[in-house]
Image (tube, grey):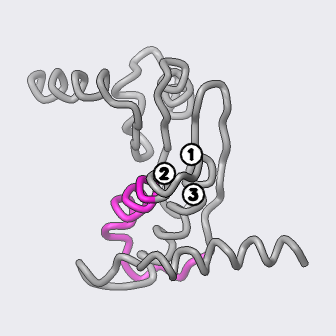
Amino acid sequence: MTNIKNAAKKIYDRCNLFLPSEGEAVIFEPEAENDVDACRRTAAKGKMAALKLGAKGAYGFCGDRQIYDPGFPAEEIDPTGAGDTFSGALIASLMDGRDLFQSIVYGCAAGSLCVQRKGLMEIAPVRREVEELVNSRREGADE
């Protein structure tokens, strides 16, 4: 177990984007009080962090900035793959030029769509579906 922890720590030290699920961040920042504090410490080191909270949404940390997104309402059928879908969508969003905080919303939308499906490969939403869900939140805020 020590070898695994040492290898993971080496990867963490080199990463610039940290994507832990609830309960994982404190493993990498043992001085932290909780996962949120661990991600704040991560961001203070110049990294970006997104703390995945499942159905409760996600936090985003960059520098001294922090946001929380509650996610999107969803009737959960199968949560398998939701965290990976969130992470993939967040990275795709960053690669499209959005900032971390916009990308947190994008990842939450993708994760929400994912849990409403059952299966393995067919659960991942396509870009159009994610963008429609994100835009529906914006349109609701404009009304």
Observer-nearest of 30 and 86: 86
Q: Earlier in the sequence, mark 2 or mark 3?
A: 3
How would you rate the neighbour count of disc 3 (Cα within 10 Å): few for under 14, some for 14-19, many for 20 or more? many
Secondary element at tag 1: helix
Q: Which residue is label 2 attached to?
A: 94
Closer to us: 142 or 24: 142
The mark closer to the camera, 1 or 3, is 1
> What is the CA distance from the residue labelled 2 to the residue labelled 3?
18 Å
Gap in angstroms between the C-alphas marked 1 and 2: 7 Å
Name the residue: 90% across, 78% down: 143
Residue 60 picture location, percent across and down? 58, 42
Q: Which residue lies under the disc numbered 1? A: 100
Please report the bounds of the magenta region as a residue range.
Answer: 73-92
Label 3's element? loop
**Relative height, residue 17 to residue 115 (above, below):** above
The answer to whether marks 1 and 2 mark residues whose Cβ atoms lie closer than 8 Å is yes
Residue 25 location (% of width, % of height): 41, 33
The residue lying furthest to the front in this view is: 97
Q: How many neighbours does mark 1 have within 10 angstroms: few (below 14), some (14-19), or many (20 or more)?
A: many
Residue 80 counted in the magenta span: yes
